[in-house]
Image (cartoon, helix red, strand yellow):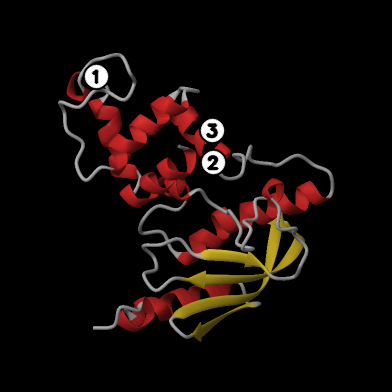
Amino acid sequence: MSHLWHRRDPALFEKQKVEVEANFPELHFRVVGDLVLVVGTFPIIFMGTVLDRYSVEIALATDYPKSLPSVREIGGRIPWAAERHINCDGTACVLLPDERWKAWPVGATLLDFLNGPVRNFFLGQSLVERGDPWPFGQWSHGAAGIREYYGELLNTRDTQVICQYLECVSAKKAKGHWPCPCGNGKRLRECHGATVQALREKIARKDAATSLQRIR
């Protein structure tokens, strides 16, 4: 069986294609090598009207929907800069992978991704271009944003505590006799075991491991 999602599950590919192109007539699916690309013009609807349009290229990885789609603005409007949430390779930070459980949970469609994280990202870009503040209180870019996200989630500003939680989340198994990541000296099972378990149910181990590596 093919490892490529669109060949392994052609019905899913066709469903996503029909749904997206029906709602966004200026976006079109292309299969390039192992990747499925969604390319074209993406309109930004704000207060019932089209506020702006962006030329975009969205790549669906070979293991989609397990991995997040990769989004690029290809019209040259957005500078490749941290303050605009663009990585040095030109990909857009439309969504912190650790926050996927909330913004684009497993089982959601590509159309949900476009109408949610992608729309919000480009709406923010348009508002900032005209001098308005970021509309959704975005996290900072990169490691700083990861610290902010987990700091709010865990109610702490201590990077070491955040790292200890991420070690528990990214571990193959969190064991109850481990020291609690909060640092109070108790065992995990006697303290924040439920918190760690809740995080493990929401956040993929690989995403927690990547975040841990980035903020250490």
> Residue beneath label 2, please?
143
What x and y, as percent, mark residue 79? 75, 58
> Residue beneath label 1, please?
191
> Residue beneath label 3, please?
148
Regarding mark 2 in the picture, which secondary structure is present there? helix
Taking the image as shown, residue 68 lies to the left or right of residue 115, namely left
Amino acid identity at mark 2: Ala
Q: Nearer the viewer, mark 1 or mark 2?
A: 2
Vertical position of residue 2 compared to residue 145: above or below? below
Number of residues whose C-alpha sits closer than 10 Å to that of mark 2, classed few (under 14), some (14–19) or many (20 or more): some
What x and y, as percent, mark residue 114? 56, 62
Amino acid identity at mark 1: Cys
Residue for point 26% across, 14% down: 185
**Residue 58 is at least partly visible in this image:** yes
Residue for point 38% across, 80% down: 6
The image quadrant of residue 190 is top left
Taking the image as shown, residue 83 lies to the left or right of residue 65, namely right
**Sooner in the amino-acid sequence: mark 3 or mark 2:** 2
Residue for point 36% across, 37% down: 166
Vertical position of residue 81 compared to residue 6: above or below? above
